Image (cartoon, helix red, strand yellow):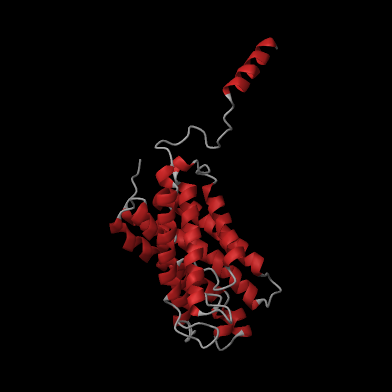
Amino acid sequence: MKKNTLWGEISAELLGTMVLILFGTGVVAQVVTGDGAAGDHDSIAWAWGIGVTLGVYVAARISGAHLNPAVTIALAAFKGFEWRKVAPYIAAQVAGAFIAALIIRATYADLIGKVDPGHTYATQGIFSTSPTAGVSIPSAFLDQVVGTAILVFVIFALTTATNNPPMANIGPVVVGLLVVALGMAFGGNAGYAINPARDFGPRLASWITGYGDAWWSTSGSHPLYFWLPIVAPILGGLIGGAMFKYLIESHLPDEPEEITVSEPVQEPARQAARDDADSLV
């Protein structure tokens, strides 16, 4: 049997993240260049969630499919993931997101050039997130902290064996649904990046391919913004991980249940009566 190597894990993280971003950035490109005729907010939320599911299926067996620096750091802080692997994993995630964004940039080049020949803020949102008009930087920061805290908290709940999680083969689907729900519930303020690699990699790809203002917010006074979808998700991930670690996991049994779905415990008298009835049949 082949053993996982760090290079194999890095490859899995790169390709898993690349699949995630191909679907996520691709759907935004379709909606933006189609002027609403080829999708809407809901299609964006669903495609991002499906992209997460498929990316996890690509990488889970080899690397655990973190696909997100905030998840990797939280796993190292609270779940025993090796700190020596954190930087390589993050580099692979950013590289995967960067490559995927370049592919989308080339694939949609004609349509982007048609609707936004100057490569302005009008289509920058294909590649990176920004606050909605009227949303302040502190509000956007809080939004990213809250969204990523929810993401990591629930991921920990879904992947902790003693918490009676979904079976391994269905786990990626549930994680994808989590991302869909986050997009539908927390997408209004700042585009729910909730993943530093998802934002920084495509932002860098857009910058080197003609988007000179890629590092700034697309709304308001256009403050420098690229740092926020990096710092806030990492902080949020640590908060979410700590909440699960100390408020849920510390109260779980030491051993996982033998069955995946819990069954109600029957009262002894009721069970005895049922056994007697069965013996009469």
Nearest to the observer: residue 83 or residue 207: 83
Considering only vertical position in the picture, is 128 above or below 182?
A: below
Picture quadrant where residue 279 is located: top right
Q: Residue at x 53, y 55 (%)?
A: 54
Q: Position of residue 118 (x, y in %)?
A: 56, 89
Q: Residue at x 66, y 15 (%)?
A: 278
Looking at the image, which residue sits at the far left?
84
Instruction: Please state, as top left, top right, bottom left or bottom right, where the N terminus lies in the image.
Output: top left
Q: Position of residue 157 (x, y in %)?
A: 48, 49
Is residue 230 visible in the rendered structure shown here?
A: yes
Considering only vertical position in the picture, is 82 above or below 255?
A: below
Direction from residue 59 to residue 10 in the image, left or right: left
Q: Position of residue 146 (x, y in %)?
A: 50, 65
Q: Position of residue 115 (x, y in %)?
A: 63, 84
Q: Residue at x 55, y 35 (%)?
A: 262
Nearest to the observer: residue 113 or residue 94: 94
Q: Residue at x 50, y 52 (%)?
A: 57
